[in-house]
Image (cartoon, rainbow, N blue to C red):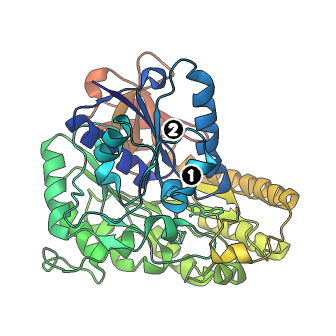
Amino acid sequence: MKKVYLETFGCQMNVSDSERVSTVLARDGFEITSDQLSADVVIINTCSVREKAEHKLYSHVGRLRKKAKLKMPVIGVMGCVAQLEGETLFKKIQGVDFVLGTRAVGRISNAVNETLSGRSGYLDVGEREDDYDWTVADTHRHSPYVAFLPIIEGCNKFCTYCIVPFSRGRERSLTASDIVRQVLELRRNGVKEVHLIGQNVNSYRPQTDSGLEQFAGKSAFSRLLRAVAATGIERVKFTTSFPRDFRDDIVDAIDEHENLCNWVHLPVQSGSNKVLKAMKRGHTIEKYLAKIDRIKASPRDIALTTDIIVGFPGETEPDFLDTVKMVEYCGFDMAYMFKYSPRPETPAYEMSDDVSPAEKTLRFMELERAQKHSQDRQLQKYLNKVLKVLPETASSRSDSGLTGHSTCHKIVNFEGSNEMLGQIVDVRITEIKTNSLFGEVIK
Ligand code: SAH
Ligand code: SF4
Ligand code: F3S
């Protein structure tokens, strides 16, 4: 049996694609291994959202070449770098044997088999098969209790800095009946939490509305949320939400269904209208804050997280200070912050990258401080609170510790036994750390 090792970089979409790829490969007679050095085939699932992410591919192959002294494995590249670079990857990186684009993941076995039987330079950046099966990989999920379920792929938004519309293609939504069927199946198989995922999950727009007619809500996504809630699965989370398409009916659905979790990830990118316009985000800061206000007015106590870019072309000090002010106003439980990274082929690449690297670093650090300050204050509200936690793994830090997530998507560590894994427990929070909470199970 040939052994395959899979390395995954990037977002949940890539994690989900990797899960599907391992399931398909296992079905087709390969062994999935966690030991890279003994693998006959190494597949690297790549991300190209920032330059740094793309470099991970190059350094990974470099390290592999150093370590694999006796026998170099077959090396395959999939994901966003594969899609964007295509054939040029063979020239750019010595040792790459096949390249498989983001819509060709279903044909992974073909790529591996052809390469193992001696074909060189196998390239597939074609479209999905018409009957492509989106079904959640059953045997190779990252957790037995939590499943990522892609409901929409691709992106039509073309924010000026972003490579994703080019690497993932146009938006395509799965039908509601397919989604509901899959959630029911996951539930039967013991999954407690499903994450509906998509680059812009709330831009969900299936070709037909069938299966959603009886549910309330203006947008298809809010009706889908209610349909998924009605399956009775214990928890539903969804990410990422696109602000322009985030309507009140989504919050209404959360308010009315306990199993729709109290967490919203709503990337703002900047606090300055001038910068938002140059980014072509399609929302003003006023509109964004109105959505935040609606979310905060929910009796469900919804946790908020976001993404922010500093140093976008043309961002002045006052623009940046608007971002700091916005962060202080919103009270995010967590923010992913990035320095702007010019991506070839995107519209912003043509703009002058006029915020110096030193200035980007200064702004990044100042924003980090502001967010940390706001976050510390924000997270205090969890102290002594009882959160419902799904223990997912034994903690890496202690022998009797468990780690899981709350409904508000906090990482929670606590003492407990392995029998608790996969069973939702009440945990009283006793300590707040920067990226996690600590607590004790209450009987
Ligand atoms: N679809 C999501 C984001 C997907 S990319 C959305 O619209 O919010 C994840 C995050 O990476 C983005 O939210 C953005 O903050 C960051 N990002 C994307 N392109 C970037 C670039 N060129 N430079 C720096 N950060 C970038
Ligand atoms: Fe990129 Fe914008 Fe699409 Fe998000 S919405 S993936 S930031 S283009
Ligand atoms: Fe990266 Fe592609 Fe996801 S560029 S963030 S892996 S869609």
Nearest to N terminus: mark 1 or mark 2: 1
Question: In the rendered view, does 433 fall on the left or right side of 111?
Answer: right
Q: CA distance from mark 1 to mark 2?
A: 43 Å
Q: Is residue 337 visible?
A: yes
Residue at coordinates 64% horizontally, 68% vertically from top-left? 329
Dot 2, crowdedness within 10 Å: few (<14), some or many (≥20)? many
In the picture, the quarter occupied by the N terminus is: top left
Q: In which quadrant of this rendering is ligand 1 seen?
A: bottom right
Mark 1 near ligand 3 (CB under 8 Å)? no
Mark 1 and mark 2 in contact? Answer it, CB < 8 Å: no
Q: Which residue is mark 1?
A: 89
Residue at coordinates 62% horizontally, 73% vertically from top-left? 346
| Identity, as a three-letter code, of the amino acid under mark 1 | Leu
Residue 35, compared with residue 191, is above or below; it is above
Closer to the eye: label 1 or 2 = 1
Q: How many marks?
A: 2
Q: Give the x, y percent position of residue 28.
A: 21, 37
Residue 432: quadrant of the picture = top right
Residue 22: quadrant of the picture = top left
Question: In the rendered view, does 419 fall on the left or right side of 6?
Answer: left
| Identity, as a three-letter code, of the amino acid under mark 2 | Leu
Q: Nearer the viewer, residue 29 or 413?
A: 29
Q: Which residue is mark 2?
A: 437
As helix, strand or loop, the secondary structure at mark 2 comes to: strand
Q: Give the x, y percent position of residue 243.
A: 49, 75
Residue 331: quadrant of the picture = bottom right
Q: Give the x, y percent position of residue 330.
A: 60, 66
Residue 416, compared with residue 159, is above or below; it is above
Q: Give the x, y percent position of residue 184.
A: 14, 53
As helix, strand or loop, the secondary structure at mark 1 comes to: helix
Residue 421, compared with residue 426, is above or below; it is above
Q: Is residue 230 visible?
A: no
